[in-house]
Amino acid sequence: MLFGVKNGRTLLWGFRVKKYVIYHPQEAAMTKADIVNRVANATGVTKLETEILVDGFFKTISDMLAEGEHFEIRGFGTFKVKERKPRMARNPRTGEPVPLEIHWVPTFKPSRELRTLVNSRMKEKQANS
């Protein structure tokens, strides 16, 4: 991946396709500190207390997933762990077969309400552009 600034405006990321570089504008992702600031401002709770709550929330989700449990938040979505079966892959550089062992990956499935909300807001945003 390549990182750079184009026209001095926004951080861009891209990938190489043969000799060409394709850039995709991407806004800065929201960080945990941004979440803490928004929640603290919305609730009136101190940033320190909010950070402790946010850390605890993320740790709870991580611990539950590590134990193989699923975590559901109604109206938001479900975090689960899915099993990936063993298979043979190929090294893209050499073409050699590489055995991949069984492994588990965390997944997130958004709720219908969240999908509808995102879709409607993105349509509004596109219509206003």
Image: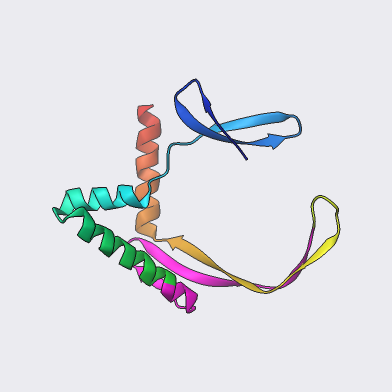
Q: Quadrant of residue 73?
A: bottom left
What residue is at 59 percent from the left and 31 percent from the top?
23
Report the label total. Answer: 0
What residue is at 35 percent from the left and 60 percent from the top?
76
Nearest the eye: 76 or 14: 14
Is 100 placed above or below 92 here?
A: below
Which region of the structure is painted magenta?
Answer: 63-90
- Whether residue 74 is visible: no
Direction from residue 126 to residue 47 in the image, left or right: left
Nearest the eye: 98 or 69: 98
Q: Where is residue 96 in the image (x, y as percent from the top left)?
A: 86, 59
Magenta run includes residue 72: yes
Is 1 placed above or below 65 here?
A: above
Q: In which quarter of the image is residue 77?
A: bottom left
Q: In which quarter of the image is residue 126?
A: top left
Magenta run includes residue 75: yes
Q: Position of residue 42 (x, y in %)?
A: 18, 50
Which quarter of the image is occupied by the C terminus?
Answer: top left
Q: How is the image coloured?
A: rainbow
- Whether residue 89 is visible: yes
What residue is at 36 percent from the left and 34 percent from the top?
125
What residue is at 21 percent from the left and 53 percent from the top?
47
Q: Position of residue 85 (x, y in %)?
A: 68, 73
Which quarter of the image is occupied by the N terminus?
Answer: top right
Q: Where is residue 57 in the image (x, y as percent from the top left)?
A: 32, 66
Direction from residue 115 to residue 102 in the image, left or right: right
